[in-house]
Image: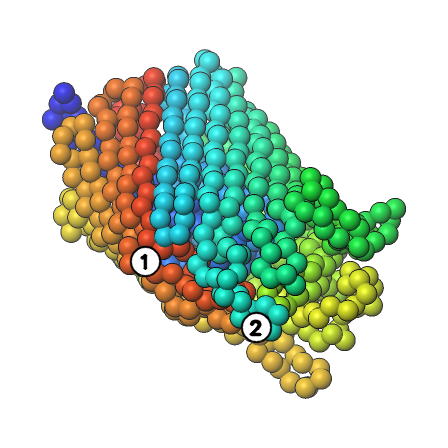
């Protein structure tokens, strides 16, 4: 039986760790959350476990109002502060994830069961991050397994209901330590039957009422990853890691009508990655320890058609694009192969009593192979950068962080982007203000891609634009935060002014370049052309409000609200005036709310229950209608069965998602407010065997380290 002293220590530990959460994303150095110079939003491990989210989209969408998602077969169209995927930098342990499909990131690369916490920094406020971070940075910190000698863990999650037959998520982990060498192997699998929210579809200039197309198609994806770390000496840690990922999407192939062509192919994705690097600890100072890190990584993301029927399509043969080529069942056709090599070096140095200097260099090479979608079948790009950042603490209640990033792009030349932020501490209050510039060159896809997509009775032709200009931004923010042992509340206002923002906008048939007509075959099809263009004027602005209140030791309530507005204009030469451009997916109002209750009935059993709600006002789009306003509620429970110092622990989650059975029945192919299916129930069971060090002592040791930082 666990003694009362140990139980009190665990309760005190939970409380202290929550108050002293350490964050690293904003400046690249450790800070207590309440003292972070750059406003940082954190989703903790405790919040993730209580919420019992099935995916990273579910977790972000359910626990913060800043994000909006529109999930599809291609991935997730994510939006933050009015800006989409291309402007949001998603990191795993500080490293960029790689690969997108049609502008959508495949976030299923991230195993939700291996997340320690998520840190969110809005705007291009840090000199450490360059391209892709104009809207902000999402850093997913994975669990660290450096205390176990032997670790075995298994998590199985099953959900069903609301038109979905099954949704299965599987996670397995194996950790082994051999002296100063440690290994952690992670396996994840996700599969779903898919679901259909409506049988209505607009096609052939009429409404078809018995469409077989699903809202979310059946899919299966799995990933195997390995990480090795070695400490040859106390001050040096080296690592090597790699992963392989595969995803298959099985689409509906029954004919909708005799005159409607079947899909004819499934979708398949293959990812691979490899990284090496290390961290060298240098001189130890009163405020911290100097350190140098080096990372080199390679990533590959390939996207294929896997044919299930005989289909006539295009093929790139002997340097020439040919039409009406016959593909047979079992044939596989490469659509795009994205590869990236990155090298990064960073140093952190504590100078005197007031300054913390961070400096580094990066090089990134991007290669795109897409025989059917890029002129000359391939394109490439490279970017190099140098950066420096100084955190200055002239007074105990004042922090000023100034940084400068020097960017050099192969096609768009040199650009310097300064950053400046300040924070003052007034007791339990924090006041933060920031200004930063961002720079983002067009991607190889935006410059070169050509893609035909059929939706209902319309065929869209997406075109790259070789005449695009690089994008720049000026981001301003001002925030006030109050943080005590019971209440945390903050409000942050921001304004993001973008020059030459790139948007995919409808254009006239006459604007299709002559060299792009080869992609349209004989030109007989009716198409709606869209082209990437620089907007003349674009800005986003809004306010984010967050609140968390511990009513008692057991009860906590909270929520967050995000107001957003956008303004973008493109000059129309034929009408000789500026025309308003809608930033797709923008919603003026988004919110989240929750109430949780936690109680330890026995030393070996703790119950947590939570009611969670999220909602959005109407989402706006340029074409195909707007997404309806919605709200969805979820009830979840989590059950912890563990004994102090015992190697075996159990964790069970169960609940009801979409309690009030909200389903958006908008017909295909028009936009949905949410793709969520109806009411479904879920249950998850985790078993963890950890033969290692004393967990309580280890956590308290980490806690003390955090307080020193």
Q: Would you name the residue on which mark 2 appears? A: 206
Residue 274 in sight in this render = yes
Which of the 4 image quadrants contains residue 637? top left
User: Can you tell which quarter of the image residue 156 is in?
Assistant: top left
Return the disc, 2 or 1, that comes first in the chain's sequence: 2
Is residue 197 found left or right of 257 in the rendered image? left
Q: Quadrant location of residue 340?
A: top right
Location of mark 1 (residue): 661
Q: Position of residue 613 (x, y in %)?
A: 30, 57
Residues 315 and 65: in front is: 315
Question: Of residues 636 and 60, which is closer to you in this image?
Answer: 636
Q: Position of residue 636 (x, y in %)?
A: 27, 46
| Relative depth, front residue between 363 and 178 | 178
Q: Residue furthest right?
A: 318
- Residue 31 in picture, x, y percent from top left: 38, 43
Seen in the picture, residue 352 relative to 567 is either above or below; the reply is above
Drawn side of residue 423 relative to residue 139, left or right: left
Labels 2 and 1 touching (C-beta < 8 A): no
| Mark 2 Cα-neighbour bin, 10 Å: few <14, some 14–19, many ≥20 | few
Residue farthest left in this picture: 4
Residue 139 in the image: state x and y as whole percent: 47, 45
The residue positioned 75% from the left and 46% from the top of the image is 327
């Amino acid at each position: 039986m666990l003694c009362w002293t140990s139980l009190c220590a665990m309760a005190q530990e939970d409380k202290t760790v929550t108050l002293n959460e350490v964050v690293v994303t904003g400046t690249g150095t450790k800070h207590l959350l309440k003292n972070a110079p750059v406003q940082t939003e954190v989703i903790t491990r405790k919040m993730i476990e209580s919420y019992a989210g099935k995916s990273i989209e579910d977790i972000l969408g359910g626990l913060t109002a800043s994000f909006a998602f529109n999930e599809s077969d291609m991935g997730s169209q994510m939006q933050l502060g009015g800006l989409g995927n291309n402007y949001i930098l998603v990191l795993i342990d500080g490293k960029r994830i790689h690969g997108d499909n049609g502008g959508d990131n495949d976030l299923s690369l991230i195993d939700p069961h291996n997340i320690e916490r998520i840190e969110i920094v809005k705007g291009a406020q840090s000199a450490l991050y360059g391209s892709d971070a104009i809207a902000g940075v999402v850093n997913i910190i994975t669990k660290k397994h450096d205390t176990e000698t032997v670790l075995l863990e298994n998590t199985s999650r099953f959900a069903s209901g609301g038109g979905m037959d099954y949704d299965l998520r599987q996670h397995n982990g194996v950790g082994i330590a051999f002296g100063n060498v440690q290994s952690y192997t992670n396996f994840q699998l996700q599969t779903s039957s898919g679901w259909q929210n409506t049988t209505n579809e607009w096609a052939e200039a009429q409404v078809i009422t018995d469409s077989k197309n699903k809202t979310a198609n059946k899919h299966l994806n799995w990933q195997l990853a390995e990480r090795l770390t070695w400490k040859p000496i106390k001050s040096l840690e080296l690592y090597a890691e790699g992963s392989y990922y595969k995803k298959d999407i099985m689409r509906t192939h029954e004919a909708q009508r005799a005159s409607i062509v079947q899909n004819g192919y499934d979708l398949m994705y293959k990812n691979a990655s490899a990284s090496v690097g290390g961290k060298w600890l240098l001189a130890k100072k009163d405020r911290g320890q100097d350190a140098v890190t080096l990372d080199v990584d390679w990533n590959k993301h390939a996207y294929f058609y896997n044919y299930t029927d005989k289909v006539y399509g295009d093929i790139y043969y002997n340097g020439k694009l040919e039409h009406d080529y016959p593909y047979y069942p079992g044939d596989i056709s490469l659509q795009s192969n994205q590869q990236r090599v990155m090298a990064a070096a960073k140093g952190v140095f504590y100078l005197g009593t007031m300054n913390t200097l961070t400096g580094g260099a990066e090089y990134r090479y991007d290669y795109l192979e897409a025989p059917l979608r890029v002129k000359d079948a391939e394109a490439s790009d490279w970017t190099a950068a140098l950066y420096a950042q100084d955190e200055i603490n002239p007074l105990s209640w004042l922090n000023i962080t100034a940084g400068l990033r020097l960017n050099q792009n192969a096609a768009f030349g040199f650009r310097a982007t300064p950053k400046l932020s300040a924070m003052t501490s007034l007791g339990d209050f924090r006041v933060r203000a920031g200004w930063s510039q961002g720079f983002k060159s067009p991607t190889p896809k935006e410059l070169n891609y050509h893609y035909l997509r059929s939706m209902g009775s319309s065929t869209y032709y997406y075109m790259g634009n070789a005449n695009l200009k690089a994008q720049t931004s000026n981001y301003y923010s001002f925030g006030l935060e109050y943080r005590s042992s019971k209440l945390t509340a903050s409000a942050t206002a921001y304004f993001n002014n973008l020059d030459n923002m790139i948007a995919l906008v409808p254009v006239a048939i006459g604007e299709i370049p002559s060299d792009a007509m080869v992609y349209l075959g004989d030109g007989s099809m009716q198409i709606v052309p869209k082209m990437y263009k620089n907007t003349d004027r674009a800005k986003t602005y809004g306010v984010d409000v967050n609140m968390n209140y511990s009513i008692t030791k057991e009860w906590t309530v909270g929520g967050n609200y995000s107001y957003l507005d956008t303004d973008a204009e493109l000059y129309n030469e034929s009408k000789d005036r500026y025309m308003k451009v809608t930033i797709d997916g923008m919603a003026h109002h988004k919110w989240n709310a929750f109430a949780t209750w936690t109680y330890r009935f026995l030393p070996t059993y703790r119950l947590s229950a939570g009611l969670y709600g999220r909602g959005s006002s109407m989402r706006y789009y340029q074409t195909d209608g707007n997404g309806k306003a919605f709200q969805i509620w979820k009830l979840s429970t989590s059950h912890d069965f563990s004994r102090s110092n015992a190697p075996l622990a159990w964790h069970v989650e169960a609940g009801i998602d979409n309690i009030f059975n909200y389903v958006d029945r908008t017909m295909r192919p028009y936009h949905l407010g949410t793709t969520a299916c109806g009411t479904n129930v879920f249950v998850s069971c985790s078993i963890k065997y950890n033969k290692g060090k004393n967990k309580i002592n280890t956590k308290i040791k980490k806690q003390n380290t955090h307080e020193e930082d």
